[in-house]
Image: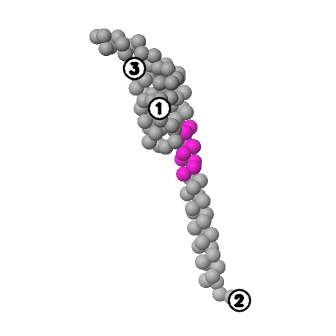
């Protein structure tokens, strides 16, 4: 009972959040951050509005990561197209 009472009195501070949440620099880190935010919200340490804002920030970070991956893949494909075009131009017969 004392343990339950102590957990209800716990206050989540900014320094706690910074220390416990990973940087949003990979999909795995984002997933871990979302799980921790969910636990805090369910445990009453984080108001729903704040939890929602945190989840939205995670969604934006995930979209940014996806965008970076897409751009990298597009650059790879563009380079491959240039290679294939160069090969094709070598195959052409002179007129």
Percent from the top left, x then y, of residue 51?
49, 25
What crowding class fits label 3: few (fewer than 14 Cα within 10 Å), some (14-19), or many (20 or more)?
few
Q: Main secondary structure of the magenta part?
A: helix
- Mark 3 or 2: in front is 3
User: Mark 1 or 3 closer to N-term?
Assistant: 1
Task: Indicate which disc residue 51 carries.
Answer: none
The residue that disc 3 covers is 43
Residue at the bottom extreme, as displayed? 95
**Quadrant of the drawing holding the N terminus:** top left
Element marked by disc 3: loop
- Mark 2 or 1: in front is 1
Q: Is residue 15 above or below residue 9?
A: below
**Quadrant of the drawing holding the C terminus:** bottom right
User: Which region is colored magenta?
Assistant: 59-69
78 on left or right of 24: right
Percent from the top left, x then y, of residue 91?
61, 83
User: Mark 2 or 1 closer to N-term?
Assistant: 1
Calculate the distance from the C-alpha at mark 2 to the C-alpha at mark 1. 66 Å
Calculate the distance from the C-alpha at mark 3 to the C-alpha at mark 2. 77 Å
The residue that disc 2 covers is 95
At 57% from the left edge and 55% from the top edge, which residue is drawn?
Answer: 72
| Occupied quadrant, residue 2 | top left
């Amino acid at each position: 009972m004392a343990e339950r009472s102590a957990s209800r009195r716990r206050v989540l501070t900014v320094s706690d959040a910074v220390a416990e949440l990973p940087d949003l620099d990979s999909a795995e880190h984002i997933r871990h951050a979302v799980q921790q935010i969910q636990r805090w919200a369910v445990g009453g340490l984080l108001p729903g509005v704040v939890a929602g804002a945190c989840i939205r920030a995670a969604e934006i970070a995930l979209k940014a990561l996806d965008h970076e991956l897409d751009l990298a893949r597009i650059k790879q494909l563009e380079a491959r197209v240039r290679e294939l075009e160069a090969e094709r131009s070598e195959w052409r017969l002179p007129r």
